[in-house]
Image (spheres, grey):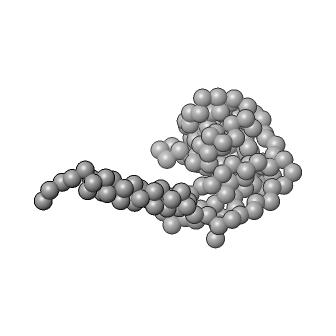
């Protein structure tokens, strides 16, 4: 088989055409699919983002509720959040809140809803100054924020 300049140019033109078709396809394929949604936020609420479900749990949208409690122990923080028609956020949710809504928090520690796996007297908290998560005893006085979840069906 003889290779000529014309055959190389023809192959290059065919390859360029394939690349153009591929790039056009890639531009029309979304990175992920979500149906168009409308989230009705109430006065003072902030949309935090999407929590992708795992382990059979559904995915949901996370909404940060207005207001916060200051200098409150964990049991009182849970009751306070329930009184706001919400709940304390989980550790995953706190990581999302830190990533997307850090400006809505003071640079201090906030309670999560999760007890520590190794010691039921301890609970996980989120620091909003440097983004760390750590365990702390339930009787300590921290801040609290409440969230609500909108399950995607």
**Location of residue 108 with respect to 7 vertically, above or below:** above
Q: Which residue is drawn at 80% across and 59% down?
A: 40
Q: Which residue lies furthest to the right in this view?
A: 43
Horizontal side of 145 relative to 22 (left or right) equals: right
The answer to which image quadrant residue 136 occupies is top right
**Location of residue 22 with respect to 109 vertically, above or below:** below
Badge count: 0
Can residue 138 be seen here? The reply is: no
Horizontal side of 65 relative to 56 (left or right) equals: right
Residue 142 in picture, x, y percent from top left: 70, 35
Residue 135 in picture, x, y percent from top left: 55, 37
Q: Residue at x 69, y 29 (%)?
A: 107
For the N terminus, the quadrant is bottom left
Horizontal side of 114 relative to 81 (left or right) equals: left
Residue 78 in picture, x, y percent from top left: 71, 49
Q: Which residue is drawn at 78% across and 40% down?
A: 69
Q: Which residue is drawn at 79% across and 41% down?
A: 68
Residue 64 in picture, x, y percent from top left: 74, 48
For the C terminus, the quadrant is bottom right
Between 123 and 46, the one nearer to me in the picture: 46
């Amino acid at each position: 088989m003889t290779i000529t300049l014309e055959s190389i140019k023809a192959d290059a033109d065919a390859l360029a055409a394939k690349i153009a078709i591929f790039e056009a396809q890639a531009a029309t394929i979304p990175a992920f699919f979500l149906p168009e949604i409308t989230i009705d936020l109430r006065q003072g609420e902030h949309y935090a983002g999407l929590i992708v479900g795992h382990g059979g749990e559904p995915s949901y949208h996370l909404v940060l509720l207005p207001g916060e409690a200051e200098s409150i122990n964990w049991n009182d923080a849970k009751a306070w959040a329930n009184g706001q028609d919400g709940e304390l956020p989980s550790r995953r949710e706190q990581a999302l809140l830190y990533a997307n809504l850090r400006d809505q928090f003071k640079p201090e520690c906030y309670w999560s809803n999760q007890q520590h796996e190794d010691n039921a007297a301890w609970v996980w908290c989120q620091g909003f100054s440097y983004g760390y998560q750590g365990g702390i005893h339930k009787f300590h006085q921290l801040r609290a924020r409440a969230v609500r979840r909108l399950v995607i069906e």
